[in-house]
Image: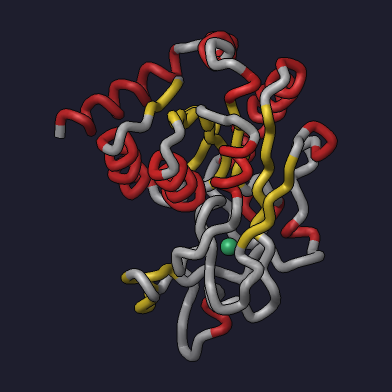
Amino acid sequence: MKNIMKIKRMMKSLLDIPFVEKIKYISSLRPEETAILIIDMQNDFISGSLRIQDAETIMNPVATFQDKAWIMGYYIILTQDWHPKNHESFASSHLKAKPFDKIQGIKGLDTLWPDHCIQGTIGAKFYEKINIDKCHLILRKGFNINVDSYSAFKENDGSGTGLNSLLLERGMKNIVLLGLATDFCVFYSAMDALEGGFSTYLLSRLTKPVDNELANNRLKEFLDKGGFILN
Ligand SMILES: [Zn+2]
């Protein structure tokens, strides 16, 4: 309860804090030890088949943030949801299922989604304001037809994507996350970053959830595990 109040206060306070202050705070993390993970900023999540409410409103600030982070020398990673047709996470791949139904998965209930981010389609492309020339790595996930992958670090069956080792080999100690959606791919990536031993920061103003209440609960879980939420 206390933490929920804390999050609510933070959410409220964010609205009053000019964007530039956030950049100033992030700049206290050393670029050579800090990876910035920009999660799934793709057409389908912003204006397409799995549109997240108000996602468009964070596009300009995300683009500005990416530009500044690039100039300052942070290690920038873009993740890209990259599903084959008939992916198991699509409701259309299951008899009589509708988008947002839940089915029993490997680790509890999985959500079924509208078809989205299919390899090679416009929906899977990065939103126009995301500059792919200003990143060091594009990490694709969810390309195994039978397994979804919310996290940039691990597929939903627990197998690693290799990102953890790559970041350790590059001497990274801090991870800063932003993007879509707060309660799914951002959250699971953030929790795996903590598990990997990284100091983990979530930029709450540069992320939007599928479900507000779920996002609040998951942010609380992230704080309880030792994560930081930045304004
Ligand atoms: Zn997906």
Residue 152's place in the image compared with 220, above or below, is below
Q: Point out the image quarter for the N terminus.
A: top left
Residue 7 picture quarter: top left
Q: Nearer the viewer, residue 225 or 173?
A: 173
Residue 80 horizontal/vertical position (percent):
67, 53
How many discs appear? 0
* Residue 193 horizontal side relative to residue 170, left or right: left
Q: Nearer the viewer, residue 28 or 59?
A: 28
Ligand 1 position by quadrant = bottom right
* Residue under the image location 73 percent in, 58 percent down: 124
* Residue 98 horizontal side relative to residue 218, left or right: right
* Residue under the image location 39 percent in, 44 percent down: 195
Whether residue 193 is visible: yes
* Residue 67 horizontal side relative to residue 227, left or right: right
* Residue under the image location 58 percent in, 12 percent down: 27
* Residue 94 horizontal side relative to residue 221, left or right: right
Q: Residue furthest bottom?
A: 95
Residue 218's place in the image compared with 74, above or below, is below
Q: Residue furthest left?
A: 1
Residue 31 picture quarter: top right
* Residue under the image location 55 percent in, 35 percent down: 178
Whether residue 182 is visible: no
Residue 41 horizontal/vertical position (percent):
66, 45
Q: Nearer the viewer, residue 96 or 20?
A: 20
Q: Point out the image quarter for the C terminus.
A: top left
Q: Residue furthest front?
A: 169
Residue 106 horizontal/vertical position (percent):
38, 75
Residue 158's place in the image compared with 46, above or below, is below
Residue 206's place in the image compared with 52, above or below, is above
Residue 32 picture quarter: top right
Q: Nearer the viewer, residue 135 or 22?
A: 135
